[in-house]
Image (cartoon, helix red, strand yellow):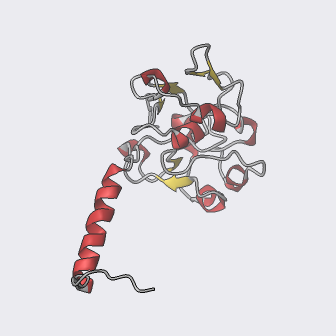
Amino acid sequence: MVISMGSTAPEMISRQDFLRSFFKSAGSSAARLRPMSPQVLLPPGSQGWSHFIANCDQCYDCVSKCPHEALRVVRDSNPKLEGYPAIYPGLVSCEGCWEQECIKACPTDALSEDLSSAPLQELFIDENLCLAFKGQFCTTCVGRCPHQGTALTLDKDGKPKLDMTHCTACGICINVCPAPQSAIQIKEQELVCP
């Protein structure tokens, strides 16, 4: 069986025009992606930014040992944190490994196994950004929280509620939030540099 496509042949385009069109569409798709927040989280086992900065010698042993590549060197955030290891939760969150290789690799007092389950920083839910608070059904952050039922829960209206007494601020909820800008935000800390 032969199907006639008519007398018009498909239009031929050059390789250059094809690539130009491809990258133009890829660029417009990339523009729709959520921008990565410059906010960063402390590495696991930290006592606070001031203590961490006072004790970290920027050897980056913790960065090289992180199996999930969650620890990165700060290059584009707060200038006081420039060059220090941190977690960009919008890119990759801390998985809270049992092995705690990053903490074990630290040759100074910057990271401590005693503080491995302590909250890294305080988080909060921005109700103006949260899809659930805008009337849409969304339970993504609650469903992915490693401390489900304690750190992140749903209230009687189906909205997420954060309890920092159980939260370790690993950043998973920040990473998985499907809102155009993550509704889980990091509370800014006053940073006192030594």
What residue sits 71% from the left and 35% below the top?
Answer: 117
183 vs 121, left or right, is left
Does the rendering let one see residue 116? yes
Q: In the figure, 15 relative to 34: above or below?
A: below
Which quadrant is the N terminus positioned in?
bottom left
What residue sits 28% from the left and 77% below the top?
Answer: 19
Residue 186 in percent (x, y) is at 48, 32
Does the rendering let one see residue 41? no
* Residue that sits furthest to the right in the current view: 98
Residue 99 in percent (x, y) is at 77, 52
175 vs 46, left or right, is left
Q: In the figure, 152 relative to 95: above or below?
A: above
40 vs 68, left or right, is left
What residue sits 52% from the left and 36% below the top?
Answer: 49
Residue 107 lies in quadrant? bottom right
Q: Who is closer to the viewer here, 10 or 61?
A: 10
Q: Who is closer to the viewer here, 47 or 26?
A: 26
Question: How many numbered marks have been drawn onto this rendered protein structure?
Answer: 0
Residue 24 in percent (x, y) is at 26, 66
Residue 144 in percent (x, y) is at 64, 38
Residue 109 lies in quadrant? top right
Q: In the figure, 20 relative to 99: above or below?
A: below
What residue sits 71% from the left and 32% below the top?
Answer: 147
